[in-house]
Image: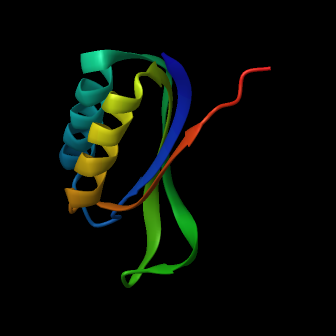
Amino acid sequence: MRNYELMYIIRPDVEQETVQAVVEKFQGIIVNGGEIVKHEVQGKRRLAYEINKHRDGTYVLVHFTATPAVVSELERVLKITDEVIRHMVVREQTA
């Protein structure tokens, strides 16, 4: 099990219920083979630059531990989810 950090941005035009459903979907994938250490929905923020004609987005930050197989499945689902406009998974270095 390795430590990872996931940040993803959800489109600003989706309903709050849809945001919650997307968050729960990704939490379910992580919990299936790992453990969530910290989960934070940071809310709507202005993007640094326009992405797909969107100027704002709902930021979500997740710290978790999982196997590489779980991370590859998570990235696969992130890529095909229409509500997510950007995502990044980073492996945290242990000191």
Vertical comparison of 59 with 29: above or below: below
Q: How far across and down, in percent of the image, does residue 81 sit?
A: 21, 56
Q: How far across and down, in percent of the image, does residue 63 sit?
A: 53, 28
Q: How far across and down, in percent of the image, does residue 28 sit?
A: 23, 25
Vertical comparison of 64 with 57: above or below: above
Residue beneath the point at 23% across and 48% down: 77
Residue beneath the point at 28% across and 35% down: 26
Vertical comparison of 50 with 77: above or below: below
Q: Which quadrant would residue 35 be assigned to in this image? A: top left
Q: Quadrant of the C terminus?
A: top right
Residue beneath the point at 32% across and 30% down: 69
Q: Out of 71 and 13, give the one closest to the viewer.
A: 71
Residue beneath the point at 38% across and 35% down: 71
Q: Is residue 31 left or right of residue 9?
A: left
Q: Which quadrant would residue 9 be assigned to in this image? A: bottom left
Q: How far across and down, in percent of the image, does residue 23 sit?
A: 30, 37
Q: Out of 14 and 5, give the one closest to the viewer.
A: 5
